[in-house]
Image (cartoon, rainbow, N blue to C red):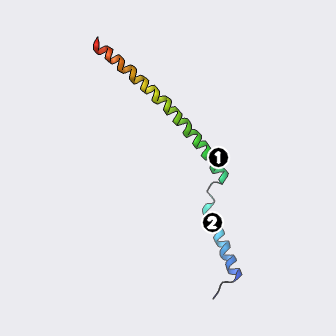
């Protein structure tokens, strides 16, 4: 028994419907890249803030160390 053209078309339609059903909740390419741009922008901001905060912590640590030394000598 061989498949007819009609059989292959029915199979193609069933497969197409299944794929549509499985992927209906996925974002479109544009939606995905728009969201990724937002996420990457936020990530960049967070990394920049961490650099600034890291510098501040280092500065505070240096100042505390100096004050502790002065306190120990007094």
**Residue at x 66%, y 68% (from the top left corner):** 16
- Residue 9 placement: quadrant: bottom right
Q: Report helix, strand or loop for mark 2.
A: helix
Badge 1 is on which residue? 34
Classify 23 as above or below 70.
below
* Callout 1 crowding tier (Cα within 10 Å): few <14, some 14–19, many ≥20: few
The x, y position of residue 57, in whole percent, is 43, 27
Q: Report helix, strand or loop for mark 1.
A: helix
State which quarter of the image contains the N terminus: bottom right
**Residue at x 52%, y 32% (from the top left corner):** 49
The x, y position of residue 47, in whole percent, is 52, 36
Could you tell which of marks 2 and 1 lies nearer the N-terminus? Answer: 2
Classify 67 as above or below 11.
above
**Residue at x 60%, y 63% (from the top left corner):** 22
Total number of numbered labels? 2
**Residue at x 56%, y 35% (from the top left corner):** 45
Asked if the residues shown at circle 2 and circle 1 are in contact, with their CB atoms under 8 angstroms apart, the answer is no
* Callout 2 crowding tier (Cα within 10 Å): few <14, some 14–19, many ≥20: few
Of marks 2 and 1, the one in the foreground:
1
Is 52 on the left or on the right of 5, as rendered?
A: left
Residue sticking out furthest to the top = 74
- Residue 4 placement: quadrant: bottom right
Badge 2 is on which residue? 19
The x, y position of residue 14, in whole percent, is 65, 72
Residue sticking out furthest to the bottom = 1
**Residue 18 tag number:** none
The x, y position of residue 33, in whole percent, is 63, 49
Say which of 16 and 30 sits in front.
30
């Amino acid at each position: 028994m061989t498949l007819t053209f009609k059989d292959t078309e029915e199979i193609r339609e069933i497969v197409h419907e299944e794929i549509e059903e499985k992927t209906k909740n996925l974002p479109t390419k544009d939606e995905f890249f728009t969201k990724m741009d937002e996420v990457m922008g936020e990530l960049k901001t967070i990394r920049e803030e961490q650099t600034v905060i890291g510098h501040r912590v280092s500065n505070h640590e240096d100042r505390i160390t100096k004050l502790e030394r002065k306190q120990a000598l007094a």
